[in-house]
């Protein structure tokens, strides 16, 4: 609290009356000791007389805070020295021609008495509460009166007569004190302007009556009333209290030479300011309702008090009064104070055996964790300890991993102990279920999931040590430790539950691990689950389980194994050889009828099948499935073996095998001979043997005659022999016709050759090469029937790029031979004597060399002059080739720049 001194520039006069200023500072009523009243409005300079008020010594005015304006007070209450309460209204306007008075009306509404005699109305206050409630508080020298009533909405302007009339039937509600010091004063604390007061302080003879205002109470609004007795240094004979002001937590008492501040919470004097004699006697103290400043004036000066941080130590007082919520409210911005309040509250609750509340408060303090925990352990309050640990755990940071681990483990142990005790008590099944739900909520907490996961082994051990299987399974599911859950179900022979967990979470590794044991007990459900998983499972990894239980299992297990293998082959189109081989093995052992169907559907070419041919052949041979073996032999293109084996089954099957090697007539004939031999020698059926002749056009009667025994008469195959002879005669006639056609063709060719020898072409001297456009006759050239003419070297260059690699190589060799032959001819000189002696031999050599050179030229002509390069097939074949070689494209581009 700070005080400012303001020196006055006026000389104070002897007190001649009372001043009453409304809370907004708009209206001022001046009451003179001559029983006259004056009125001054803030917006005017003129003081006006209140004629209707004349004759009454005004002691107090109760302003209307709701209806008052700058120009009109609205209905107000006025208390006089004779105990009469008047209702009046003042208007600052000039009024009409016949009514120029500012007071609109002035009427008596009530009167107050003390000891049967009128008593001055020292103070009067008008307040409005909720639901149109009106509260009027008036004080005399030793009495405090209350008038509580309701005013209908919209009728506020009619005044307060209704309130007093409602209280006339009852005795006046008042509080009286025995001592009278000649006057009294009441003050109110209002947090905001135009709001309802929250507390009051009444200065009277016996002390200061302090309390709260509760507008909800129907009869009296005063609550929590207490009297503060004056201190011994206050003597009514020479330093009676003069005035009082109420703040939020203190009231200020003005004495003739000092000001005292008393705390309303504990009644202690917290501040005292003594005024020196030079300022004179203190006269009055009042509080500005708008700004909150406290003003004190003496005979010579005016002082202003500014109250700062009034609530800074209030929390301590509330704490000592055990009002901990209020204490925390007033120190919420001071963590060290909050901690002290919480510690005191926790200790208070603990002493009063409110252990759960104590635990919650202790968890928020900075007190030593060990001390608090031991405190609850010694008191055997496990529930409170658990609450303390939970709150402490929730307040820890994520970085405090060690502390979190300790608390989580400890809480788990506490929960398990409590569940164990409740489970043994049948009468507490409801509490047991609530505790279990709470424990499971703790285990599934997302905030501590990381800690629980990192220490899951410890949690599992704790659960196992208490034999709490259900919660262990629940915890395993939360930790996604489905392997442990499935193992638990399997150990308890609950295979359907294990499969349900597997199917729900679709973990492939767990399927591979637990399928063997599940397949042993619930094969159909397992296979259904596998099929539902589809391609997410690798069938190859399930084979160990299938092989194990298909060998030692029941018929149902075998059938389910085959069903899944068929699903893999036909639905998933699995191409792994192991799957197909295993399915074949199952078919061979348990479903032979399906074996041949599978082989036929799998395809007839080795590139189409996905099983091992050799393994399948051995498998079928072991089980004696000859027809299946024949099919495998056919796929392996071992037609002789297929026919040999097919003859043991069916001749028609052997015939179908014999026709397979279409491109090898010799082999086909050999196979048909095998069939014919079998039919003749084994079946001794001549008719069938003759059918073999009609089925294969490669066999003749003479091919199968050696197979018949000597005693067989010719009548059995007379028709076949005649047919064969007729075929021979027909073949001879065809050969004769072909010979005649060949002779005629040779004759025509000779005639064409002779005609070609006489054919020629005329080349003019101005003719040019079609390739280089130079005169043709300058160099050796070629003339084609189409009319195109080329130099030899030009044609060579045109044709060479279009020749095949083989012809290009051959052409190069011929050129080398021609060059060598030409060089030998040029270098030959006149013959020496020796050469002359062997003249005949030399002549023969020359002739041989000449023939060789001409032959080489002829071979070259056959390659490069086979056809016109512009009109023949070479031009057609080169249509998709670029005009410029891609390798020479860049070089060609640069040549154009």
Image: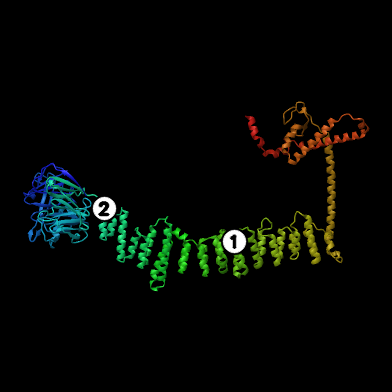
**Discs 2, 1 touching: Cβ within 8 Å:** no
Q: Earlier in the sequence, mark 2 or mark 1?
A: 2
Q: Nearer the viewer, mark 2 or mark 1?
A: 2
Quarter holding residue 182: bottom left
Which residue, given by chain and number where applicable, does mark 1 sit on?
541
The one of 234 and 484 positioned closer to us in this rendering: 234
For residue 582, side relative to residue 485 (left or right): right
Judged from the image, the secondary structure of the residue bearing numbered disc 2 is: loop
Quarter holding residue 236: bottom left
**Residue 687 appears in view:** no
Q: Position of residue 785 (x, y in %)?
A: 77, 34
Q: Position of residue 652 (x, y in %)?
A: 74, 63
**Residue 407 appears in view:** yes
Instruction: State whether residue 518 is above or below residue 337.
Output: below
Residue at figure coordinates x 27%, y 56% from the top left: 315
Q: Quadrant of the C terminus?
A: top right
The one of 364 and 645 positioned closer to us in this rendering: 364
Which residue, given by chain and number where applicable, does mark 2 sit on?
312
Q: How many marks?
A: 2
Q: Give neighbour class at mark 1: few <14, some 14-19, many 20+ (Cα, 10 Å).
A: few
Instruction: State whether residue 410 is above or below residue 750.
Output: below
Judged from the image, the secondary structure of the residue bearing numbered disc 1 is: helix
């Amino acid at each position: 609290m700070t005080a400012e001194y303001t020196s006055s520039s006026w000389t104070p006069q002897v007190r001649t009356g009372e001043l009453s200023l409304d809370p907004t500072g708009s209206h001022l009523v001046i009451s003179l000791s001559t029983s006259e009243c004056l009125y001054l409005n803030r917006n005017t300079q003129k003081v006006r007389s209140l004629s209707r008020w004349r004759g009454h010594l005004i002691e107090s005015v109760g302003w209307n805070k709701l209806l008052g304006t700058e120009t009109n007070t609205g209905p107000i209450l006025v208390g006089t020295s004779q105990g009469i309460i008047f209702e009046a209204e003042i208007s600052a306007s000039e009024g009409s021609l016949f009514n120029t008075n500012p007071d609109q009306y002035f009427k008596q509404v009530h009167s107050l008495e003390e000891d049967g005699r009128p008593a001055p109305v020292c103070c009067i206050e008008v307040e409005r509460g909720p639901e149109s409630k009106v509260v009027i508080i008036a004080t005399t020298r030793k009495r405090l009166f209350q008038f509580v009533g309701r005013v209908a909405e919209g009728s506020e302007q009619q005044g307060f007569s209704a309130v007093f009339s409602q209280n006339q039937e009852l005795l006046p509600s008042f509080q009286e004190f025995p001592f009278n010091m000649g006057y009294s004063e009441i003050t109110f604390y209002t947090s905001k302007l135009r709001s309802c007061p929250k507390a009051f302080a009444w200065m009277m003879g016996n002390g200061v009556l302090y309390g709260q205002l509760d507008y909800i109470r129907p009869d009296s609004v005063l609550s929590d009333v207490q009297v503060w007795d004056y201190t011994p240094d206050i003597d009514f004979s020479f330093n009676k209290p003069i005035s009082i002001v109420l703040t939020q937590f203190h009231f200020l008492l003005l004495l003739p030479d000092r000001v005292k501040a008393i705390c309303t919470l504990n009644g202690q004097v917290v501040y005292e300011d003594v005024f020196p004699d030079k300022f004179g006697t203190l006269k009055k103290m009042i509080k500005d309702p708008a700004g909150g400043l406290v003003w004190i004036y003496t005979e010579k000066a005016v002082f202003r008090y500014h109250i700062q941080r009034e609530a800074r130590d209030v929390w301590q007082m509330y704490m000592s009064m055990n009002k901990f919520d209020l204490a925390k409210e007033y120190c919420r911005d001071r963590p060290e104070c909050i901690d002290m309040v919480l510690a005191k509250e926790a200790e208070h609750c603990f002493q009063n055996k409110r252990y759960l509340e104590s635990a919650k408060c202790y968890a928020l303090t900075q007190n030593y964790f060990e001390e608090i925990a031991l405190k609850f352990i010694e008191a055997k309050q496990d529930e409170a300890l658990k609450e303390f640990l939970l709150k402490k755990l929730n307040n820890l940071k994520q970085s405090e991993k060690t502390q979190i681990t300790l608390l989580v483990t400890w809480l788990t142990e506490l929960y398990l102990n409590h569940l164990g005790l409740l489970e043994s008590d049948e009468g507490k099944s409801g509490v047991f279920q609530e505790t279990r739900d709470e424990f499971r909520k703790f285990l599934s907490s997302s905030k501590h999931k990381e800690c629980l996961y990192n220490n899951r082994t410890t949690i599992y051990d704790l659960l196992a040590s208490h034999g709490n299987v259900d919660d262990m399974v629940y915890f395993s599911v939360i930790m996604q430790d489905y392997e442990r859950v499935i193992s638990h179900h399997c150990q308890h022979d609950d295979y359907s539950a294990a499969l349900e967990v597997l199917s729900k979470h679709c973990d492939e590794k767990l399927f591979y691990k637990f399928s063997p044991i599940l397949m042993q007990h619930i094969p159909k459900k397992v296979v259904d689950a596998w099929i539902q998983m589809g391609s997410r499972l690798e069938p190859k990894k399930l084979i160990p389980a299938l092989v194990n239980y298909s060998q030692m299992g029941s018929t149902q297990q075998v059938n389910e194994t085959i069903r899944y293998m068929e699903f893999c082959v036909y639905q998933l189109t699995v191409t792994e050889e192991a799957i197909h081989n295993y399915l074949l093995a199952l078919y061979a052992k348990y479903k032979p009828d399906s074996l041949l169907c599978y082989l036929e559907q799998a395809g007839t070419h080795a590139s189409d099948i996905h099983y091992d041919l050799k393994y399948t052949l051995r498998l079928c041979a072991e089980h004696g499935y000859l027809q299946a073996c024949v099919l495998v032999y056919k796929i392996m293109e071992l037609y002789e073996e297929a026919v040999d084996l097919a003859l043991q089954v069916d001749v028609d099957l052997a015939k179908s095998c014999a026709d397979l090697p279409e491109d090898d007539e010799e082999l086909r004939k050999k196979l048909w001979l095998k069939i014919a031999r079998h039919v003749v020698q084994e079946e001794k059926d001549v008719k069938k043997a003759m059918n073999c002749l009609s089925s294969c056009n490669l066999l003749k009667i003479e091919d199968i005659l050696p197979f018949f025994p000597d005693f067989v008469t010719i009548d059995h195959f007379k028709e076949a022999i005649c047919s064969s002879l007729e075929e021979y005669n027909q073949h001879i006639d065809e050969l004769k016709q072909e010979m005649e056609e060949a002779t005629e063709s040779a004759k025509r060719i000779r005639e064409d050759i002779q005609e070609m020898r006489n054919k020629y072409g005329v080349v003019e001297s101005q003719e040019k090469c079609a390739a280089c456009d130079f005169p043709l006759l300058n160099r050796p050239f070629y003339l084609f029937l189409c009319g195109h003419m080329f130099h030899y070297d030009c044609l060579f260059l045109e044709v060479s790029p279009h020749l095949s690699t083989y012809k290009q190589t051959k052409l190069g060799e011929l050129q080398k031979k021609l060059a060598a032959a030409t060089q030998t001819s040029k270098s030959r000189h006149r013959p020496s004597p020796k050469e002359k002696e062997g003249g005949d031999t030399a002549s023969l050599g020359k002739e041989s060399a000449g023939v060789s050179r001409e032959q080489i030229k002829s071979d070259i002509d056959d390659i490069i002059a086979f056809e016109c390069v512009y009109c023949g097939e070479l031009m057609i074949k080169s249509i998709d080739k670029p005009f410029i070689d891609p390798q020479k494209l860049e070089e060609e581009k640069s040549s154009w720049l």
